[in-house]
Image (tube, rainbow, N blue to C red):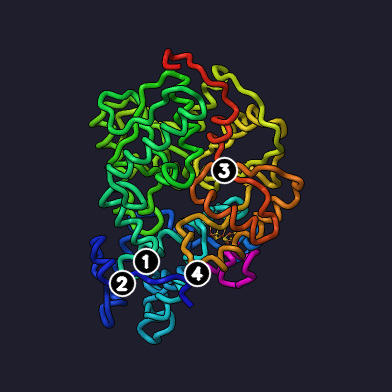
Amino acid sequence: MIPFHVAKEKEMRAIGIEPVHGDELQGKAVKLIHDYRNLSRSLSVMLENCTRCGACAEACHSYLGTDDYYNIPAARAGLFRRIFERYCSWKGRLIGRLSRKNAFNSRIVGQWAEYFYQCNVCRRCAMFCPFGIDTGEITIAARNILTQLGIAPHFIVGIGKNELNTGNNTGILKPAIMDSCAFLEEELREETGLDIKIPVDKPHADVLYVPSSSELFTNTDTMLGAAKMFHFLGVNWTLSSTILEAANYGFLFDLDIMKRHNRRLRIAAAAIGAEMVIQGECGHGWRVARMLSEGANGPVTFHLTHILEFAAANISKFRLVKIPMRATLHDPCNYGRGSGLVDAPRELIGACVEEFVEMSPNRELNFCCGGGSGLLMDEMKDLRMLLGKKKAEQISALQPLDYVALPCASCKAQVPLVLKHYGMGEIRTGGVIELLGKAMVMGSIGGNG
Ligand code: SF4
Ligand code: SF4
């Protein structure tokens, strides 16, 4: 059963996709599979080299949480492999002339939608596979093909449309952005007595900060921490009303939307004349910006960094008072396995709290929280709690615990629900930059204090 509300045809047309019907389905799907194979040589390599050894099974939190055979990475990939072999190998094509076995049809569409949307694209399976087979990449390929056939979650399509139209997930426009920034500036004034600005579309800024848009509404402590840090360092920075979103949902279901959202970033940076772009706390958004942007749209003209890297590089300049708490870090998959961003958050948390404890396993072997790859939809909440079971076990083993640092907007949405579901609702959660903001003794080394 498909676990999400499928987007309506008119919603797909709004993002430029013409849904496919009846007799057209097989021909279009086969063309898309061939196109994707030509685009990505690694897809063929991953589909052709699995020995069914089973080493990936215990690596996947999705399988461990649901106990569903098709959530074993190799079995999930097998749903694609069978179709791939049927249409892309001489043997499969020969058999296809004699039998309808493994023909692409609406039943396959349903199965792909069911299981490729129970994969968080966390890539942990690839760490344990002797051949490095990354079922997350196969999931991305399958999701892209489903999208081109007209099948995608209503939730993700809505976000993709918002990103295309406004440059942020919630579709907020500049007046609402300005209101929210004014409100947060007032909070900063009350807390610090300082006139700390959160500039929007400031011309000639040196630094463009691309946050998660949730930092203006729900994860506001992360924005407050970032604003304090920039103020303290005397950074000439700004937000852009046209790219207020580090997340890039196109990566999760439509690579063309991914490229277009990434181009917004480049246009905004050029318009401001920014020499540096700093991405906020968003896992997959950082993976796209750091690892995929150049391949998608060519070299960038600015220095690109992550707010955790930027803060860690300046750590000796801050005056910090350690917060009396016992805290741990959840390594977002797209940092730990997607881009090697593991040391900076540890350095920051270690400097900001009295006791830092490691989850086990951690860094590139950490388990996914179950919220990544766009699965945050309400209708998938029960399933997501199963996907979060390994995360709950990891956190439970660290009790008593005061705080789980979650430097990714998707993890910030998922982990509090997981903690509540598994009876640990009293543990606080939030960002890493939030901790920095709370530990900082204000003033300024840049003349703005
Ligand atoms: S990418 Fe993650 S969720 Fe998907 S199959 Fe691999 S381990 Fe499981
Ligand atoms: S570990 Fe690799 S080779 Fe073994 S079953 Fe899983 S994907 Fe196939």
Q: On residue 430, which mark appears?
A: 3
Marks 3 and 4, Cα distance to the nearest angstrom?
30 Å
Of callouts 2 and 1, the N-terminal one: 2
Q: Residues within 10 Å of mark 3 (few under 14, many from 20)?
A: many
Of callouts 2 and 3, the N-terminal one: 2
As helix, strand or loop, the secondary structure at mark 1 comes to helix
Identify residue for label 1. Answer: 154
The answer to whether mark 2 and mark 1 are in CB contact below 8 A is yes
Marks 2 and 1, Cα distance to the nearest angstrom?
7 Å
- Of tags 4 and 1, the one toward the viewer is 1
For residue 187, say whether it is visible: yes
Q: Residues within 10 Å of mark 1 (few under 14, many from 20)?
A: some
The residue segment tinted magenta is: 62-76
Query: In the image, is 72 to the left or to the right of 398?
Result: left
Q: Quadrant of residue 436?
A: top right
In front: 25, or 232?
232
Asked if residue 331 is positioned above or below residue 369 in the image, the reply reads above
